[in-house]
Image (tube, rainbow, N blue to C red):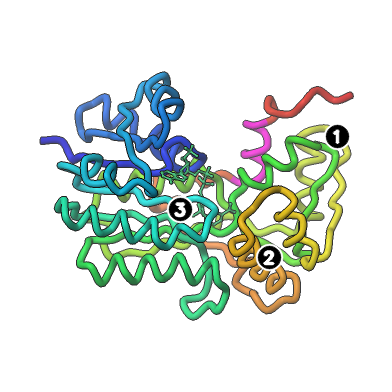
Amino acid sequence: MAHRILITGATGTVGGATLRALKADAEAGKVELLGAARSSEGADKLRDAGFAPVSFDFDDVSTLRPALKGVDSVFLLTGYSVDMLVQAKRLLDAAKAEGVRHIVHLGAFAAPDTPHAHFAWHQLIERATEAMGFDWTHLHPNFFMDTVWNGFARRPDRLVHFIGDRRASFVSSDDMAAVAAEALRNPQAHKGKSYPLAVEAVTFNELAAVLSEVTGRQVTYMPRPAAELFPVMQRQGAEANYAKSLAEGIAAIESGEFAEAGATFDNVETLIGRKPIDWRDFATTRLGELPAAG
Ligand SMILES: NC(=O)c1ccc[n+]([C@@H]2O[C@H](COP(=O)([O-])OP(=O)(O)OC[C@H]3O[C@@H](n4cnc5c(N)ncnc54)[C@H](OP(=O)(O)O)[C@@H]3O)[C@@H](O)[C@H]2O)c1
């Protein structure tokens, strides 16, 4: 029987990219691929893209065990919510009950003894995964290029961020997905491994220069104090506790206490057999997403 893989977060950025990264393996019959969808719209979106959806809602426990039946490996991705803790626990309990062997978790990059909440929550999920006896692979991406790009694409003359002139390291969803796909199709080679994922470090002034060059438009970095992030996120509808955790981490980067935020690693090329995507590559392939210059 083909190795059965469930991708959670399949209708989102990294989960969607991970499904696409495994499509050829599924078409070749090497893996059986299921994409989690919590709504009929999400299921239609997956079906239209050629994937098999399965009904799955972290907040409806009755959906979890049926979705996990016969599954060998799970890609565990939770959304931008403190509910990530209870959602991951529900998933792990259901996966244990259904005999899942391998969990590939999308966490976040920080020192193992980080005091910062959002990173600490991801680490608690990983400690629980290990203690429950699963084979595990932990992915620790730093800043997503996609998240910064999505903000930039709405207003492509400016970059707004809250870390001042500090350097931050980035990785693209396609590189995270390629590493996740490799771990999911090859559990024996990747069990018991943690992979930091951060391929290029830049200040936002340096990034603005790259984006100016690639887009042919003048892009200006407009730094805002980290103290303004929490109210901004609240106005955008973010959950208060989650927003507080992110704002706290960003303030630590701005003040220089979170020195590892600018670290990079050369592991991606070895893991996926191609050069990682840097900011110049990323912006070049996404140029078509920008509104016409006016
Ligand atoms: N952005 C960064 O720079 C960064 C850096 C490091 C780590 N991370 C981590 O990346 C993760 C988010 O990844 P992403 O950007 O790919 O997320 P995303 O695009 O926001 O996608 C979230 C996915 O989770 C699904 N989801 C949400 N609630 C659910 C529920 N109750 N049941 C089932 N599925 C549910 C969503 O489904 P719907 O389509 O139905 O909403 C969607 O598929 C977070 O854990 C975050 O900590 C982010």
Q: According to the image, label 3 marks what residue? A: 268
Q: Amino acid at mark 1?
A: Arg
Q: Is residue 183 left or right of residue 227?
A: left
Q: Nearer the viewer, mark 3 or mark 1?
A: 1
Indicate the position of residue 124 as horizontal and vertical percent values. 40, 70
Looking at the figure, which quarter contains the N terminus? Answer: top left
Residue 279 inside the magenta-drawn segment: yes
Task: Confirm if mark 2 falls within 8 A of ligand 1.
Answer: no
Q: Amino acid at mark 2?
A: Ala
Residue 12 inside the magenta-drawn segment: no
At x 80% / y 37%, what residue is drawn? 155
The CA span between labels 3 and 1 is: 31 Å
Q: Is residue 192 left or right of residue 156?
A: left
Q: Which one is earlier in the sequence, the residue at label 2 or at label 3?
A: 2
The CA span between labels 2 and 3 is: 28 Å
State the mark number for residue 247. 2
Indicate the secondary structure of the residue bearing disc 2: helix
The CA span between labels 1 and 2 is: 30 Å
Q: Is residue 176 left or right of residue 288?
A: left
Q: Which one is earlier in the sequence, the residue at label 1 or at label 2?
A: 1
At x 42% / y 62%, what residue is drawn? 85
In magenta, the rendered stretch is 278-286
Looking at the figure, which quarter contains the C terminus? Answer: top right
Q: According to the image, label 1 marks what residue? A: 217
